[in-house]
Amino acid sequence: MKSWARQYEVETPGIVRATDVRITLSSRDELFADVALYAPADGRCAEVADRLTGPRLQGPPTVVIGVAETDRGRDLSDRIDALREGGVTEFVLAGARGGLQWFRLDDDPLRPGRGGGYLKSAALPGLWLPEAVLAPDPSKVDVVAAVRAGCGTLDHALFVNGLCNGTGRKAR
């Protein structure tokens, strides 16, 4: 999942990828994310220095990505509720043994859009995954190629233009 998010950051000027990061969503909610994607220009999320524990994110990133193995012992519904209340738009949970769950936290249904064989983020245009990642063994799925395909769309180009110029649609 880290290579997927890294490729999206490379293809999308104005989006930042933070890895293995603590996120403070409110005075009572702090969590760990394997990966977070956010647009600093929208003012919702920013990296802040913490002398004791290193950098952390303050405010909700647009997309939080977790790996089930690092989430052991946590109740998924509690985590989703905290992310939703904190303002995170989408949460992707990759299974330790394959498979994937992608939750939209701002709308119903709680799944990403689909089309052309891809799962598609509603919050970050071009952030696509092949539907094959939903299979029990997605190890041979080329997630980088899916991001490249998604980032080759007009919707993604308009999104990047808006991020770079401070106008238009921004990450939600």
Image (cartoon, grey):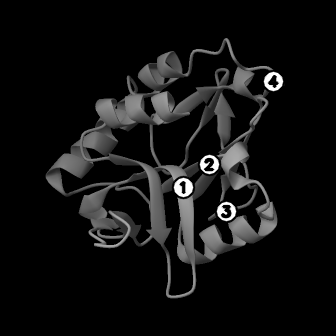
Labelled disc at residue 66: 2
Q: Report if the CB atoms under discs 1 and 2 are less than 8 Å apart.
A: yes
Mark before the other along the chain sequence, 2 or 3: 2
Which secondary structure lies at badge 3?
Answer: loop
SS at mark 4 in the image: loop
Q: Quadrant of the N terminus?
A: top right
Q: Which residue in the protein does label 4 denote?
A: 135
Pointer 4 with pointer 1, Cβ within 8 A: no
Question: Tag 4: residue type?
Answer: Ala
Q: Residue at x 70, y 65 (%)?
A: 80
Q: Amino acid at mark 1?
A: Ala
Image disc number at residue 148: none
Query: Is 131 above or below relative to 28?
Result: above
Sequence order check: which comes first, mark 4 or mark 1? 1
For the residues marked 2 and 3, what is the alpha-carbon distance in whole angstroms?
20 Å
Say whether disc 2 or disc 4 marks the residue closer to the N-terminus: 2
What residue is shown with label 1?
Answer: 33
10 Å neighbourhood of mark 3: few (<14), some, or many (≥20)? few
Mark 1 or mark 2: whose residue is earlier in sequence = 1
